[in-house]
Image: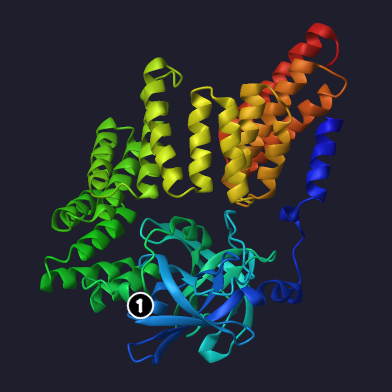
Amino acid sequence: MKRQLLILLFYLGNTNLFAQDLTIKQLITKAENAIFTVFAADEQGNTFSQGSGFFISAQGVGITNYHVLDGAHSGYIKDKNGNKYKIKSILDYNPNTDLVKFQVENTNLKSFNYLHISYRTQVKGEQIINISSPLGLEQTVSTGIISSIRTDEMHGSILQITAPISHGSSGSPVMDMKGNVVGIATFCREGGQSLNFAVNATQISKLSHKRNISVSQMNTNPLETKMVKSANDAYFMGDTNKALSLLDNELKTNPSNHLAFYMKGMIEFSIKNVESALSNLIKACEIGKDISFYYKQLGKCYFQLYIYTHDTSYAEYALNAYSKGLQLTTEDAELFYHIGILFYQYALKSTENPYSDNNKQLYLKAQEALDYSIKIYPTAEAYTARADVKKMIRNYGSAILDCDKAIELAPDYYRGYFTRGDIKIFDIGSYEGIVDLERALFFVLDPKEKADILGLRATAYERKAFQELGANAGDLAAKAILDYEEAYKLSNQPMYQEFKNKLIDKIKEYVQQRGSFP
């Protein structure tokens, strides 16, 4: 225990990951040189749109909102000091999440200040700060909290914030009090109540470097009509009925608009109108038969139904949809990722023994798909998922290396620490894995996720107490009981109470037999 404590103290003292919250002044000093104003220009070079953005790499890779550059022939940025840089190429974009990743022209090989992306799970009430250029007022600072969080398949995780977003703020970073980006300001609704929204910053990891096209080639989708855009905005702000009504009107006038069918299907799926949702998604695939994205999203919906119902036919439908997507593209890292997750979950749920020989073949297929995903575009999520797969085929050393890579890519993504700690403790038998669970706890705010980690740590304390039966066995057992109690309070899951009671009975039985514990 002393050695573990020293390891933890060393780690806490030698990394800024565990830094204390900064003051507003410190945050501004840290971030302001990485934030810029974005300008969109027409063919004559006239500026017609303005927003904000920020760098995510020293090489000049920037992020802003898709709608800021939508319809532009060219674009440029202006930093805090008035320096202008042409947008050289669009690396990737996603109209649904309203994000675009680009590379600025950097002939002098300048090293740019940049911001780090947070992979923590955000919670309501968390303090945030935003630096942007609203209405042309460059480097304006506003503060607030995360007032609401909503997740859907079209936009990912959406943060509603109290910090004001106005024209020109779009694309600016929403940061936590350590200066890490938790969201990208994207939309506000004015009127009786000002509602301000940001896309979760983890969506940036889903943008690749593959497109590498000019700004002018980022053409507006002709199917993204005014009515479709209004429907997307309505759904983004949580007005589902209005969004569906607008899409119905669009399909009455343009029944071949597969984008409208896709959006309607995804919205209906989010409100559990499953039969109609699947019908509309299939229709989108039939009309837009060359769009792999539709098949991927259809597959994800089938996969969710499989997880919820355990009906294996949904897993087969999901694989069929993913396979059709692969026939159209083999360069979609997210598609391979979801195929890997499908095989992994199918193996876990298909038999009572997840380690059976038959399941090993499924795990190997899962690993192969995740190999492709990582080769195309490595993410912390993909590395952690592959580590989970390797754990099931008892390739523990390689699994830990994958966790290491996940942590390297996203140092505040708790799953990397959680999985590595799990493998070290329960597969290798090294209780140094408890240190990883401590790290995972540090980065988790969500009660359910925290309960999962506490439950695992409690089990580790319990096992260590009874395996070693040393002088500190009583302390370890007491810690286990406290962790089980806290996990129950956070999750209201009866199993943690059951685990605690079984541990207490186990200790009582030991005392009855031997007089004391240990």
Residue 262: name its quadrant. Answer: bottom left
Asked if residue 406 is positioned above or below residue 199 in the image, the reply reads above
Question: Residue at point 59% right, 74% down?
Answer: 108
Question: Residue at point 70% right, 48% down?
Answer: 442
* Residue 181, position as x, y percentages in the image: 59, 65
* Residue 69, position as x, y percentages in the image: 39, 78
For the N terminus, which image quadrant? top right
Q: Amino acid at mark 1?
A: Asp
* Way the structure is coloured: rainbow
Tell which of 395 and 499 is nearer to you.
395
- Tag 1's secondary structure? loop
Tell which of 163 and 81 is nearer to you.
81
- 341 sits to left or right of 143: left
Question: Residue at point 52% right, 62% down?
Answer: 201
* Residue 305, position as x, y percentages in the image: 32, 41
Question: Residue at point 54% right, 74% down?
Answer: 107
Residue 490: name its quadrant. Answer: top right
Q: Which residue is mark 1?
A: 70
